[in-house]
Amino acid sequence: MAFTAPVLATDAPPLEIYGNLPTFDDAAISPSGEHVALILTEGDKRQIVIFDSAMQPIMSMAAGDTKLRSIAWAGDELLLLSYSQTEELPFGFTGDLIEVYRVMIVSVDSKKKPETIFLNKRGIANATFGSYGVRKVDGKWTGYYGGILFKQEGSGTYKFDHGRPALMAVDLERNEPKIASYPASEGAYRDWVVGPDGEIAAQLDFYDRDGSWRIENSKGNTIAKGQKPDGRISLISLGTDGTTAIYSTSDEEGGARHFYEVALTGGEPKEILEGKNATAISYNSMTGLMDGYYRESGLPVFFAKEDQMAAQKIWGSFGSGGTNMVDWSDDVSKVIVRRSGEGVAGDWYIVEIPTSGLLKLGSERPDLPADMIGEIRTVDYTAADGLEMDGILTLPPARDAKNLPLVVLPHGGPHSHDSAVFDWWAQAFASRGYAVFQPNFRGSTDQDVTFMRAGYGEWGRKMQTDISDGVAELVKQGIVNPDRACIMGASYGGYAALAGVTIEQGKYKCAVSVGGVSNLDTLYRTGYIEMSGRSKLTQKRLLEELGPRESLKTYSPEEQASKADAPVLLIHGLDDTVVPFEHSKRMADALKNAGKPYKLVELKSEDHWLSRAETRNQMLKEAIAFVEKYNPAN
């Protein structure tokens, strides 16, 4: 009789292989394809390297432990490096942290010193608040960013006035900003689309007091207007030829998103992309012109024949699942592709479209053998009320998919989703002998907008039972043992983990919450009162999302801590600005007061996204040790 021997923890790769930051983090190609920029990582130390067309390095810059977020080109000679830092609120505010985003200009000419946009500029806060693309104006590259202006006093000093951003045009060669458009009035939100000539082509103003909105052209004439009390109105781009503006609204009932095109000279807006299953618009970041759209599957559809042929060629070679077109040259002759999925932990390539040439740039985890990557499956199932959904199942390597111990790993958001790609959390647990299930419960974004909005008001309710229904399907198929399951998640997933042993009972042997929400009323008050200044729109959205105010206590794990029926591990970054550390601290206090077993782990200098290798590894080791203690794999 043949059998498969289980993988022992002593045979598995070191946890650092999973917990470390990816060795290969990001890539961008310049418009002509002449230069390629890479972000490489070793431990916590990052490095930006620029290569020529022959892939020979011509410039490198050490970035240390800076939290790099993205890279993009402005022409062929300037690289824009986006990064963030966790800082205390300025201007006399105390006790609160914010994640501040900045952009650094890096020249291919290594003799030029990198400069940060808005740094040491009088009258402007040292941070960017939104990016609106780059344009070549009078032969010079200009970047467009949201900036907070200070109010000048008679003494020549500046003071904070309000937090509504202006649109700033930054000469990227000289790092000199100027005002392109002033901020919105009090109680309003403003957005812009910049034309290919660098001038503001369209501007959206939304008014919180009554939900009214209007779009103006460059002359200040209103070309579209309406009322959306729910705030679901977005100005997106220009049309394909630059003579129209593209915007979208969403239904309140069905939740469907509609895209409209209106002439910049005025006229009746017309709905576009009807029947195309379009979820988003694709546009050129250097012109602002619409060049395609994205389907519900996440795959792009390009209007230009050569662009679409290039995409189809790539999907034909790699397959569409787990394959992303990350960046490409203007003529789409060179495309940077990322591949992740079965047996692949994240590989990056440059594809030469005309010749079908393929150059591997690097791997995110080069030390992880392919045979130690667990099998990834999509599992379809039906919730108790008949709603169809799916989840991602990762199986332990070299172990039969029968009667396995289980780690349930619901995603954050909650409006996001998991796909059949390499996931470092899931694979780390799979390497220790666990099946890992990532349910795409109602509210997830892997189906249509109606499915996503089906999660509204269902925190701790149907979104929670959807998770349990997915586990029941795995039990029905004989893959997992229902008596050997733990639940773990981050952010909303952390809430679901806590709810799984407080609001629900009898489901799990332990729960692990990483930066998780523990109190819905605290989440509501923080968003409505502290963050938005009692915005009616924010209040409406929060209550729509969380449920009626009077129900929040019932569905808050902190308030239900006395019902906890399994040990709880709380892990939280002290620099978390999305779900403050207070949530885990108060949950720990509630469990302690109720006499329930728990452990609280503080991650020093760590944010909501686990951006540092040291604390990622600390989280992973603590979580796996906790799960192995209460739900051993072997």
Image (tube, rainbow, N blue to C red):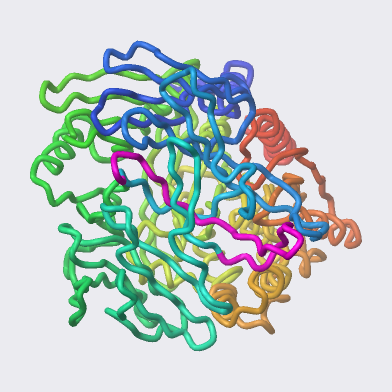
| Residue range highlighted in magenta | 137-164
Q: Would you say residue 153 sits in the magenta stretch?
A: yes
In this rendering, the answer to whether 229 lies above or below 580 is below
Residue at horizontal 69 percent and vertical 36 percent from the top: 619
Q: Quadrant of residue 506?
A: bottom right
Asked whether, in this view, residue 489 is left or right of residue 335, the answer is right
Q: Nearer the viewer, residue 532 or 525?
A: 532
Q: Nearer the viewer, residue 240 or 120?
A: 120
In this rendering, the answer to whether 339 lies above or below 109 is below
Q: Is residue 181 visible?
A: yes
Q: Would you say residue 166 sits in the magenta stretch?
A: no
Asked whether, in this view, residue 149 is left or right of residue 272, the answer is right
Report x, y in % for residue 78. Answer: 40, 31
The C terminus sits in image quarter: top right
Residue at horizontal 54 percent and vertical 73 percent from the top: 545
Report x, y in % for residue 19. Answer: 60, 29
In this rendering, the answer to whether 547 lies above or below 520 is below
Q: Quadrant of residue 268?
A: bottom left
How many numbered marks are there? 0
